[in-house]
């Protein structure tokens, strides 16, 4: 595996938790709990392999439409996750980042997320980026508003806007040179982006894995990294 052409930044849409639970006659929240435990396994594997950044789509701006009890459980998951797995994150020098509209989170959820960010701020290992209460449409609209306001405030010139400068207004800009994922994995067999990183994924390689997220193992992850390693990323150009 160490000889593979590994991506620097992997993004995962962790899909299929609810269906995993329903197939087993369990409530949907049982699937989310299993998915949380699986995240530890995959994040540890990514860190050990030398992946520089792992972004996981944990909660979308559209997920608020789900039943209240499920939303409440999902809002409590970061509390459980960080309380349970922080020692492992610290041991592996993982730095936690949150991408999303954090000001809309319940106070307890916001507090634990901010604590995790602060606690791991100086870690030098892999970045574990949670896209939590994130939606790409809203992110792009807000970035446009921010640039327009900067123009009105005479901080920047309208004609200075290009793709690079616009990207600096997106929430993912905090990842700096790792802003754009090289590789996207979506589990559960679904084949769509679901309003996730629409700007950043423009030239990402994509694999749609059939496994539900709780069943997506380290072996599956390595299998899909092998697929990435065999891709030829031409960015719209031709091989020389």
Image (cartoon, grey):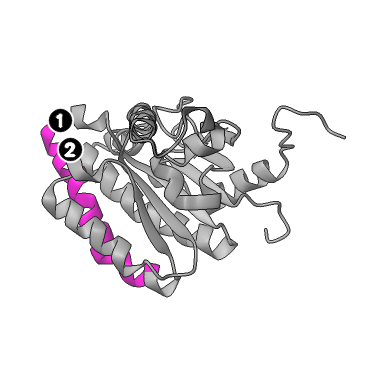
Q: Is residue 28 left or right of residue 107?
A: right
Q: Is residue 26 something one can see in this rendering?
A: no
**Can you tell which mark lies on residue 67?**
1
- Percent position (x, y) of residue 95? 41, 63
Label 2 Cα neighbours within 10 Å, binned few <14 / some 14-19 / many ≥20: some
**Can you tell which mark lies on residue 70?**
2
Q: Is residue 69 one of those drawn in magenta?
A: yes
Determine whether the residue tagged by mark 1 lies in a helix, strand or loop. loop
Q: Is residue 233 left or right of residue 174?
A: right
- Percent position (x, y) of residue 228? 65, 42
Residue at image point 65% right, 52% down:
6
- Percent position (x, y) of residue 162? 55, 31
Residue nearest the observer in this picture, 161 or 124:
161
Residue at image point 25% right, 58% down:
114
Q: Is residue 88 something one can see in this rendering?
A: yes
The secondary structure that dominates the magenta segment is helix
Determine whether the residue tagged by mark 2 lies in a helix, strand or loop. helix
Q: Is residue 156 left or right of residue 32?
A: right
Please say if 207 is above or below 91.
Answer: above
Residue at image point 70% right, 51% down:
5
- Percent position (x, y) of residue 235? 69, 32
């Amino acid at each position: 595996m160490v000889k593979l052409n590994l991506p620097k930044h992997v993004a995962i849409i962790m899909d299929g938790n609810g269906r995993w639970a329903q197939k087993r006659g369990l409530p949907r929240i049982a699937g989310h709990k299993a998915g949380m435990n699986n995240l530890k396994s995959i994040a540890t594997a990514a860190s050990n392999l030398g992946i520089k950044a792992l972004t996981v789509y944990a909660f979308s701006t559209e997920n608020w439409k789900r039943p209240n009890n499920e939303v409440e459980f999902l809002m409590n998951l970061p509390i459980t996750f960080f309380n349970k797995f922080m020692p492992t994150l610290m041991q592996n020098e993982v730095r936690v980042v949150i991408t999303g509209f954090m000001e809309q989170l319940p106070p307890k959820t916001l507090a634990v997320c901010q604590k995790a960010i602060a606690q791991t701020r100086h870690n030098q290992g892999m970045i574990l980026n949670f896209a939590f209460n994130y939606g790409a449409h809203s992110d792009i609209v807000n970035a446009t508003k921010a640039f327009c306001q900067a123009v009105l405030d005479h901080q920047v010139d309208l004609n200075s806007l290009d793709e690079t400068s616009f990207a600096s207004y997106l929430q993912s800009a905090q990842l700096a040179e790792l802003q754009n994922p090289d590789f996207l994995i979506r589990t559960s067999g679904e084949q769509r982006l679901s309003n996730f990183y629409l700007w950043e994924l423009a030239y990402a390689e994509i694999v749609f894995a059939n496994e539900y997220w709780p069943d997506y193992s380290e072996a599956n992850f390595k299998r899909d990294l092998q697929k990435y390693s065999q891709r030829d990323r031409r960015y719209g150009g031709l091989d020389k």
